[in-house]
Amino acid sequence: MAPAPCWWYFRVNGITPGETITIRLRGSTATVPKPGAPPQKPLASSWAMPAQATFSNDGQTWLHTEKGKRQDEWMIYTLKPESASVFVAWGPPYTPSTAAKFVRAMSEKSPHAKATELCRSRGDRAVPMLHVQEGERTKEQRFGVWVQARQHAWESGSSWVAQGFAEWLLGDGADAAWLRQHAEIFIVPIMDVDNTATGNGGKDAVPQDHNRDWSAQPHWNEIIAAQRMVSGLIEEGRMDVFLDLHNPSPDDPTFFYVLSPELLKEPMIGLRDRFVELAYARISKIKPLIPMSNKPKVTGANYHPLWRQISANWVSMNGNPHTVSVCLETIWNYPNSTTEGYRAVGSNLAAAVREYLAERPAKP
């Protein structure tokens, strides 16, 4: 495995439908590289051993197993498939083909959505993107909203959050229509398509982690393209909301990462805090529960040597005075960390964007 050897996804054939099968899992012995240092000790096995694994009889509907049982260095999961073949995974998978199919389906469903590509990856794979706007307002009259997921390939739940955002945005509700009519929205369900396609983790990838690549000379095509488009919104004075979607460590709830306030000026700090307040009010009340902290974690000089090159930090430091730029980490090791739970987080995040922008002065 490449960096972050913590996610897995395979298929089991030759099952008698209805029989109980057992999956025995042990942590990888692969060492994990650190920035500027040789490979270190293996990643803790807890990253690869969710309390409940995920399975599917058809590759479409993903369910949780019963809670796994830990026996020494092993985690043991049992499940009873209804078919002769079953998919089993660390969490609900979301592949590049899933992203392409989704943006295409949204485009076919709604006249306000356009399926497009952010770019071609270094591996010559498409990076699907959804572009959404409604009505006759010019771009100068629209808020700019950028939503991206999966800068770390293993964090598959974040792609489902992005999908939930898009589904809400293209729904029939009046609030969704308002956001489409007053904003131009870009949604990228998978940034690191190459590592997602090959099953690598992506975190601390060599030669560069996608979320440490927002520099003057990015390595990855996805970052070059996203940075160019976000810079365009900044130049137009309408980089209003930038959302970078991730999944956290095994024991973390849902929370926001924000840039340390001493590195920012008003009105950016107050606007960001207001957005976080609105998003927390919605996401924390999701039923079934998605645990969320109302205290964002802070990134800055003490967080990582390349902290200036983290996407949300880069946008904050280079954005407009009113730009809100945050990273949302959505809990993955929890009973409600399912496709439905992730999509509920995304839909409530979208509703929070609408509520926040409705408080802002209209574009002239």
Image: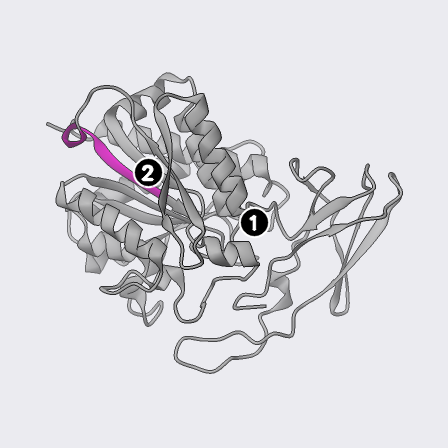
Residue 18, image quadrant:
top right
Q: Position of residue 302 (x, y in %)?
A: 32, 70
Magenta span: 139-147
Q: Nearer the viewer, residue 24 or 337?
A: 24
The tally of labels here is: 2
Secondary-structure class at tag 2: strand
Q: Any magenta on residue 354?
A: no
Q: Nearer the viewer, residue 137 or 100?
A: 100
Q: Crowding near pointer 1: few (<14 within 10 Å), some, many (20+)?
A: many
The numbered mark, 2 or 1, whose residue comes first in the sequence reads 2
Secondary-structure class at tag 1: loop
Q: Quadrant of the C terminus?
A: top left
Q: Residue at x 81, y 38 (%)?
A: 83
Seen as rendered, the residue at the extreme left is 364
Q: Quadrant of the N terminus?
A: bottom right
Per the image, the residue denoted by label 2 is: 186
Above or below residue 181? Residue 303 is below
Q: Position of residue 331 (x, y in %)?
A: 53, 48
Q: Position of residue 207 (x, y in %)?
A: 40, 71
Q: Is residue 60 left or right of residue 315?
A: right
Q: Amino acid at mark 2?
A: Phe
Q: Crowding near pointer 2: few (<14 within 10 Å), some, many (20+)?
A: many
Per the image, the residue denoted by label 1 is: 332
Q: Position of residue 129 (x, y in %)?
A: 38, 40
Q: Is residue 37 left or right of residue 23?
A: left
Q: How is the image coloured?
A: one colour
